[in-house]
């Protein structure tokens, strides 16, 4: 089983930037897609971005396309989410997730089966 630990959340003003990090351990990191999801109070957890096992393919929700960038470092077993031009509606707990099957891309909740504890991102207007 894989362990995921997020960091980098905090309070940021609208229009600012934030970089989330996720450290993975417990299995061969480079074989699995990685994703970021978020959950705002009273809402369901939603897909934000994902990256395939090699880093060659990335996927984004329409709400963050052009503002957020996902990347990974298969040597350091890390995945990142660079958040630029943040908006108050980006306020949520952000979760890192690891893919369910090796060498399979994923963009849905059921494509991932390991989750971090989450990191809070709050965007002030």
Image (tube, grey):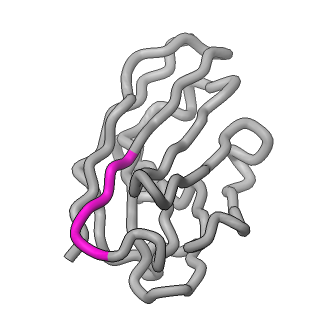
Which residue lies at the image location 72% right of the left edge and 68% below the top edge?
57
Residue at image coords 54%, 54%: 72
Q: Is residue 55 above or below residue 19?
A: below
- At x 54% / y 86%, what residue is drawn? 103
- 26 in the magenta segment: yes
Q: Is residue 61 magenta?
A: no
* 107 and 82: which is toward the camera: 82
Q: Position of residue 89 (x, y in %)?
A: 57, 32
Asked which quadrant contains residue 107, the reply is bottom right
Q: Find the residue positioned furthest to the right.
A: 66
Which quadrant: the N terminus?
bottom left
Q: Is residue 94 above or below residue 9?
A: below
Where is residue 84? Give x, y as percent. Answer: 67, 27
Question: How far across and how far down the image is residue 55, in percent?
Answer: 64, 64
For image coordinates 22% across by 50% down, the residue present is 117
Give the left or right position of residue 38, taking residue 107 as reference: left
Closer to the camera in the image, 101 or 74: 74
Quadrant assignment for the C terminus:
top right
Residue 106, image x, y percentages: 56, 77
When the figure is inspected, residue 30 is found, relative to residue 12, above or below; the finding is below
Q: Quadrant of residue 82?
A: top right
Q: Main secondary structure of the magenta part?
A: strand
Which span is picked out in magenta? 22-27
* Direction from residue 67 to residue 27 in the image, left or right: left
Query: Closest to the observer: 91 or 106?
Result: 106
């Amino acid at each position: 089983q894989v362990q995921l630990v997020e960091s980098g959340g905090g309070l940021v003003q609208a229009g600012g930037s934030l970089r989330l990090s996720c450290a993975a351990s417990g299995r061969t990191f480079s074989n699995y897609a990685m994703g970021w999801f978020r959950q705002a109070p009273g809402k369901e957890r939603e897909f934000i971005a994902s990256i395939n096992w090699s880093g060659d393919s990335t996927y984004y929700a329409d709400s963050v396309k052009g503002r957020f960038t996902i990347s990974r470092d298969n040597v350091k077993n890390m995945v990142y989410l660079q958040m630029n031009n943040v908006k108050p509606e980006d306020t949520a707990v952000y979760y890192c997730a690891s893919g369910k099957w090796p060498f399979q891309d994923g963009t849905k909740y059921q494509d991932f089966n390991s989750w971090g504890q989450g990191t809070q991102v709050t965007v002030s207007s």
